[in-house]
Structure formats: structure tokens, C-alpha cells
Image (spheres, grey):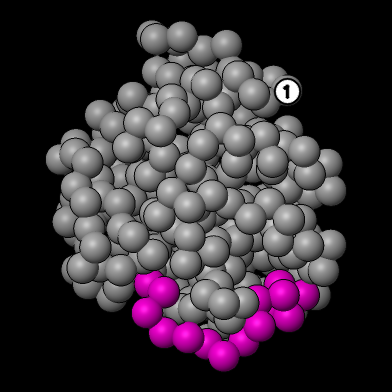
Amino acid sequence: MFTIFPAIDLRGGRVVRLKQGRAEKEMVYGDDPAEMARRWADEGATWLHVVNLDGAFGDADNLNADALKKIIATVNMPIQFGGGLRDVGALKRALDVGVARVIVGTAAIEKPETVSEALHEFGTEKIVIAIDARDGVVATRGWVNGSGMDAKEFGKKMRALGAVRAIVTDIARDGMLSGIDAGAMAEFVRATDLRVIASGGVASLDDVRKLLRVSAIGIEGVIVGQALYSGAFRLREALNLTPNPSPTRRGERRPRFCEG
């Protein structure tokens, strides 16, 4: 099943979007992340993608921790969560709070043994690897640092450790509404044998269509942020393109932690 993940990026307890991951290029879209989550639930979302930007940048993130708890209490759907989760203890705490899947990014580069340990302890369905690349090179620490590692080679390494799924982000396109490179995403799947959730640059419904056309090879979904927040299209319009659009209407609830 192809999943569309509305993105909620948290900074200082607010909903924001960054351009190309740059902290100085921040646009605030709301002071109530839980209400934003409810909006996406009302439009039919089946998953949420939530990122703790303060954690990713190494800043104090208590406000974001509180916001995550409120999101979980407000909407009855699985949440994919990351940002600053750099050891197994942090991953466990996030899972214990109630997220369905945790994202391992910087730790996967700096301490790959964390991935092995997390996969063993929590299972493959609870772990997704973040592969954030600029010009084909993986970036870390909130996309601030270059790792020097080729993104595809890194993906192969994670697959060899037992990971099955990765969020692949084209940093140069992220937040820019410049269109997604579906061909590159498909090439990444073929090279690494990882299932991919595409991210970075979605600008129109045509981008969703492009990914759907190659989804059978292992592209499981797409994360959409700026396009939704800017009004380029509505979530329901994108969901209606998928083979099994959610029938949920305002006021309905769906079982939590259903995969898909």
C-alpha cells in the first residue's frame, strides 16, 4: 500500500517548515501541533510524519516532547517520529510514549551498531533509516554536517545490517516546491533493496502520480509538507490518487497502529 504522510515539523513547540533544512529559513504554520494533527486526520491521513527539529539540531526540546504527547493523545493513528534519536534508549523512550515507528538518522552514520541493536530489540517494522542526501552525500546532525558517505552505499550498508525501510530525502529540494525526482528514488530502491518513503520537493499532484507509477518496485509512500501547508493541493486530493484512499470523514476514528 502506498502511504501519504503529512509532515509536522516541531520547533519550539510550534509547527514550522524549513527550506532545505536551514534553521534560518523557518516559516511558522501554527502554535498548536495537536490541532494540526487533527486537521490531517480529518482530511483522511492514515499516518503522520513528525520531526523534532530541536532534537535534530541538538537544542532543548522539552516543548516538542510535550507537543508529541498531545498529538498522540489527540489523533488515533500511527506516528512515524524522528529528530535527535541517537541511541537505543532514546528510541525506546519514543516508542514507549506511543509512536509506531522511530527514525534513525545521525546515529546510523556515526554509530551503525545502534541500528543493529535497535532492529534486534524492536523489530524491523519499528525502525526506519533516514537517508538525507545533498548531491548524493549523506548529511547528519539536522542536515548541517556532511558525512562524506555516498547515499546508495550507505543504504546498502543499512540493508546488510537488516534494515528494510528508509526515508530518502533530497535536501536540495526539501521545502522548495521544486518537484520530486521519482526516477532517482526508483534507482535508489534498485541499488539498495530497501523499501523507500520518498521525501523532498513534492510540489503538485503530478509528483504523487510519478511516485505511484514506480511504487511497485518498493516505493512505499511519500512525505508531504510544504505543498500541503502552502495550499498547492489538499491532502484528500492526494489520497484520492492512491489505490485505497481512506474513507475516513470528520469525527470518525480508526484503529491505532494499523500498518499502511
Name the quadrant containing residue 221.
top right
In the image shown, does 172 or 59 lie closer to the viewer? 172
Vertical order, 196 against 37 (above or below): below
Instruction: Tell me which residue sits at (79%, 49%) in the image.
Output: 218
Name the quadrant containing residue 37.
top left
Vertical order, 6 against 153 (above or below): above
Residue 145 drawn at (x, y percent): 41, 84
Residue 19 drawn at (x, y percent): 34, 60
- Of all residues, the one furthest to the bottom in this rendering is 148
Instruction: Tell me which residue sits at (67%, 26%) in the image.
Output: 242
In the image shown, does 45 or 225 lie closer to the viewer? 225
In the image shown, does 139 or 95 lie closer to the viewer? 139
Which SS class for mark 1? loop
Q: How many marks?
A: 1
Segment tinted magenta in the rendering: 142-156
Determine whether, in the image, residue 233 is placed left or right of residue 100. left
Q: Which residue is mark 1?
A: 243
Residue 125 drawn at (x, y percent): 67, 50
**Is 152 inside the magenta-drawn segment?**
yes
Residue 214 drawn at (x, y percent): 78, 44
Instruction: Tell me which residue sits at (41%, 74%) in the image.
Output: 143
Q: Quadrant of the C terminus?
A: top right
Q: Residues within 10 Å of mark 1 (few under 14, many from 20)?
A: few
Q: Quadrant of the N terminus?
A: top right
Instruction: Tell me which residue sits at (40%, 27%) in the image.
Output: 40
**Is 42 inside the magenta-drawn segment?**
no
Q: Amino acid at mark 1?
A: Pro
Residue 46 visible in this rendered orientation of the protein: yes
Residue 112 visible in this rendered orientation of the protein: no
Determine whether, in the image, residue 33 is placed left or right of residue 251. left
